[in-house]
Amino acid sequence: MMQDKVVVVTGAGRGIGRDIALLMAAEGARVVVNDLGGAADGSGSDQTPAGSVVQEILAKGGQAVANYESVASWASAHRIIECALDNFGRIDSVVNNAGILRDVIFHKMTEEQWHAVIDVHLNGAFFVSRAAAEHFRKQESSSYVHMTSTSGLIGNLGQANYSAAKLGIAALSKSIALDMRRYNVRSNCISPFAWSRMIGSIPTETPAQQARVKRLQTMETAKIAPVVVYLASDAAKDVTGQIFAVRSNEIFLMSQPRPTRGIHRSEGWTPQTVAEHAMPALRSSFVPLDISGDIFSWDPV
């Protein structure tokens, strides 16, 4: 499905990104395997993970090149895209998968913990996407696939930085889909459920957290890759601006915010009538304070 396409996969040295890169290559793509090689919290760097994935692809007869740049700056993100152009002459798809975690309860979160996660996830998705945009526009084709999370789409404890970044990515993807559709460029999100090195840092202090982690440990990272490859391929030419959750053998189309209930008062509102009339009328449709595990409460299929 990706024959002769050139794909950049960020964070492709391990976990979900590695499996995406391997399947892209198996489906005929020439792959830029991008990975800084840092720890799950973003610290450090190591060229081994990306290099190992490239060697796996080459050993199977595929084409790939390693790239060790960070996604978290404008300049380095442009160098990632330039790597594809220098080695393969074009760029057809970007998979924004790179990520880190700095989980901590909101009232104890530091400025550094906030910025570190926003920089890699949200800024990184923008920087790499933007670096590819001019090439996509000139080609009048191409696709983006971004990784969001139910931590942002639904909610989760102790992840204000990650949740904000991931919900921001969903909005970024929709904006790209709207702005770039005139050039036949598509943009979609996947919310993956899988056990990986990064997810391994999720807190397990409460029974609910322990149950969530136990459930995640049964889900393989390789289950995410087929949907990513499909969305990046020409077979998905009419699919854009969507959010899919992938959970083992399950694929879900996720809702996006729309009005669910409304009320009006012809003479306008006062604080008192809002309290006496509007809120009682709307209350039955309030969204509860769910977390991801409340909504996806069953064992993966």
Image (cartoon, rainbow, N blue to C red):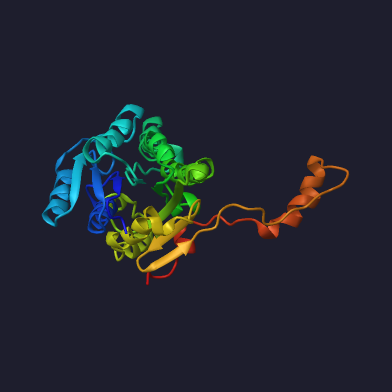
Position in image of residue 158 (x %, y %): 42, 46
Position in image of residue 238 (x %, y %): 49, 56
Q: Is residue 64 left or right of residue 172?
A: left
Q: Looking at the image, can residue 143 be seen?
A: yes
Image quadrant assignment for residue 162? top left
Name the quarter where the C terminus is drawn. Answer: bottom left
Q: Farthest residue in the top direction?
A: 75
Position in image of residue 31 (x %, y %): 24, 47
Q: Looking at the image, can residue 123 be seen?
A: no
Q: Residue at x 28, y 35 (%)?
A: 80
Q: Is residue 213 left or right of residue 285?
A: left
Q: Residue at x 26, y 39 (%)?
A: 89
Image quadrant assignment for residue 3? bottom left
Decide which of 89, 41 is in the foreground and name it: 89
Decide which of 261, 227 is in the foreground and name it: 227
Residue 94, compared with residue 208, is above or below; it is above
Q: Farthest residue in the bottom direction?
A: 301
Q: Farthest residue in the right direction?
A: 267
Q: Is residue 239 left or right of residue 100?
A: right
Q: How many marks?
A: 0
Decide which of 38, 283 is in the foreground and name it: 38
